[in-house]
């Protein structure tokens, strides 16, 4: 059984469909990528999964349970966390406070501390700066805060939206390494990106969207050799 199954969903804004009868499946334990140019429907797909913009028709199932009709906080409670595009940390809160927000559904202080220690092990720089206001950090460091905050929820599926956006090449390379490390911890990843080279390099499987429709999918290596993907992304 697929971890996440999307079956013929159509999602619209102002009665205009953005996603058109879209179907795809994510297997557990893998990095699955969603590729597509601006306007392809990638962000709308994320919003549909999270219940922020519910589909008009079709079904979305996570671990066999339908997410349709659930409010966003209950979708997250099922075991899904999202790292939003542009990071969106809380700039006037410290690193440690930002991380605690990610575990807002956890009441046990000892468990929260244990999860924070796991994040600090992955991002030693955050441990060094845990009392620093997140808004005073560099873009790459804020990206670490955003990813760490998502991990505090102990998700079964981590959705990461455009992690390379606005970052220097050095931090982009580091972020993709961290994403691969997160997957090695047993967390399934849905990676939504335009940085095709590095995305396909760490992904196991990928889907390509164009104007809200699925135009190609397959093993990441084969996708990188696909004529349609080559034409769209590599000229």
Image (cartoon, grey):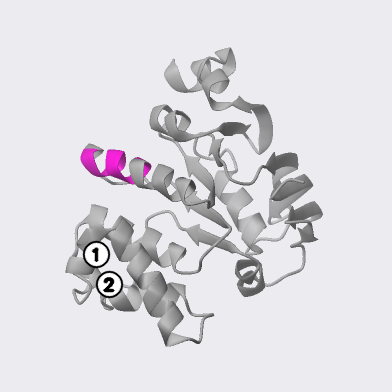
- Do tag 1 and tag 2 residues touch (Cβ < 8 Å)? yes
Instruction: Where is residue 12? Give x, y as percent.
Output: 70, 52
Left/right of residue 123 with respect to residue 197 in the rendered view: left
Q: Secondary structure at mark 2?
A: helix
x 68%, y 32%: residue: 214
Q: Is residue 19 above or below residue 122?
A: above
Residue topped by disc 1: 126
Mark number, residue 159: none
Q: Secondary structure at mark 1?
A: helix
Q: Kindly tell me whether residue 88 is visible in this rendering.
A: no
Residue topped by disc 2: 95
Indicate which label's residue lies in the foreground, 1 or 2.
1
Alpha carbon of mark 1 to alpha carbon of mark 2: how far? 7 Å
Instruction: Where is residue 95? Give x, y as percent.
Output: 27, 72
Q: Kindly tell me whether residue 6 is visible in this rendering.
A: yes
x 58%, y 58%: residue: 156
Q: Quadrant of residue 25?
A: top right
Q: Is residue 214 above or below residue 41?
A: above
Mark toward the start of the polypeptide (1 vs 2)? 2
Instruction: Where is residue 81? Give x, y as percent.
Output: 53, 62
Q: Residues within 10 Å of mark 1 (few under 14, many from 20)?
A: many
- Between 62 and 212, the one lying in front of the other is 62
Q: Magenta stretch?
A: 170-176
Instruction: Where is residue 1? Give x, y as percent.
Output: 77, 46
x 58%, y 32%: residue: 205
Examine the residues drawn in magenta and state their main secondary structure: helix
x 54%, y 38%: residue: 33
């Amino acid at each position: 059984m697929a971890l996440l199954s999307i079956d013929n969903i159509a999602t619209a804004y102002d009665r205009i469909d953005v996603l058109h009868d879209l179907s795809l499946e994510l297997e557990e334990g893998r990095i699955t990528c969603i590729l597509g140019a601006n306007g392809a429907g990638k962000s709308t797909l994320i919003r549909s999964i999270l219940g922020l913009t519910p589909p008009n028709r079709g079904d979305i199932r996570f671990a066999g349970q339908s997410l349709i009709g659930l409010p966003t906080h209950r979708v997250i409670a099922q075991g899904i966390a999202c790292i939003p595009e542009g990071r969106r940390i809380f700039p006037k809160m410290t690193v440690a406070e930002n991380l605690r927000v990610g575990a807002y559904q956890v009441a046990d202080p000892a468990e929260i501390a244990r999860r924070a220690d796991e994040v600090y092990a992955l991002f030693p720089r955050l441990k060094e700066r845990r009392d620093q206001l997140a808004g005073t950090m560099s873009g790459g460091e804020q990206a670490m805060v955003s990813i760490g905050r998502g991990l505090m929820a102990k998700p079964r599926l981590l959705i990461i939206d455009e992690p390379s956006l606005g970052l220097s090449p050095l931090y982009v390379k580091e972020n993709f390494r961290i994403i691969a490390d997160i997957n090695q911890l047993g967390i399934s990843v849905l990676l939504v990106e335009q940085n095709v080279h590095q995305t396909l390099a760490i992904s196991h499987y990928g889907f390509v969207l164009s104007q809200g429709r699925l135009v190609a999918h397959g093993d990441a290596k084969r996708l990188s050799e696909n004529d349609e993907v080559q034409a769209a992304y590599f000229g």
